[in-house]
Image (spheres, grey):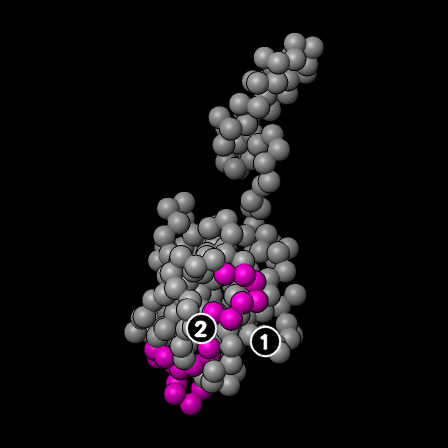
Amino acid sequence: MRPRAMRPAAAWLAGAAGAGFLAGVLLTSAPRPAPVVPRQLLTPPPVSAPTIGTNPVEELRKRHLALPLPDLERGDLRDTFDEMRGGTRRHEALDIVAPRNTPVLAVEDGQVAKLFLSKAGGLTIYQFDPTATYAYYYAHLERYADGVKEGDRVERGQVIGYVGTSGNAPPDAPHLHFAIFKLTDAKRWWQGTALDPYPILSR
Ligand SMILES: [Zn+2]
């Protein structure tokens, strides 16, 4: 981030002698040593690049993601993120009850990173957001939408699968298990930190 921030200023300095003094002031006054300031605040902000918010939930809320099922109201959602499953494991997802074969919609533009069959999740989709910062996870699908494959670009609202009970969902309770992960810098579909989708989708 630092070299990127320096380069435009350096070019500016070289190209416009009159502006050199101002640029010099900006550059020398930006990284002030202050031991008590949190680490992320010590990094000088990029000159003009769009910033990734420091609070991922707030950042995603601002994107006004689509809901993953049609005919669903934001007020219908229930926060099941902190519920315990299997006695020891936090759920870290939303369960959204819907009839079997209800279309499942991409909540944002992005890319299908992985179609994965897991014991618990059954037929699942890991979709990256357009910046590959977040992964949206859709599980217990009855089936994938025709033609959907790994690497596909998808659009917000596009049908990518159908609600079902694959994996460990009760056969008489079809629902979509929906999760959001903040990916690591390595951007691997199986590595990330779960974010509660409820405050993101419910408003
Ligand atoms: Zn679930």
| Residue type indicated by callout 2 | Ala
Q: Which residue is mark 1?
A: 70
Q: Position of residue 75 (x, y in %)?
A: 65, 74
Q: Nearer the viewer, residue 152 or 101?
A: 152
What segment carries the magenta color?
Answer: 154-173
| Label 1 SS | loop
* One can see residue 9 in this view: yes
Q: Residue furthest left?
A: 119
Q: Which residue is mark 2?
A: 145
| Residue type indicated by callout 1 | Pro
**Looking at the image, residue 23 lies above or below residue 48:** above
Q: Nearer the viewer, residue 36 or 73?
A: 73
Q: Position of residue 53 (x, y in %)?
A: 58, 46
Image quarter hosting the C terminus: bottom right
Foreground label between 2 and 1: 2
* One can see residue 91 in this view: no
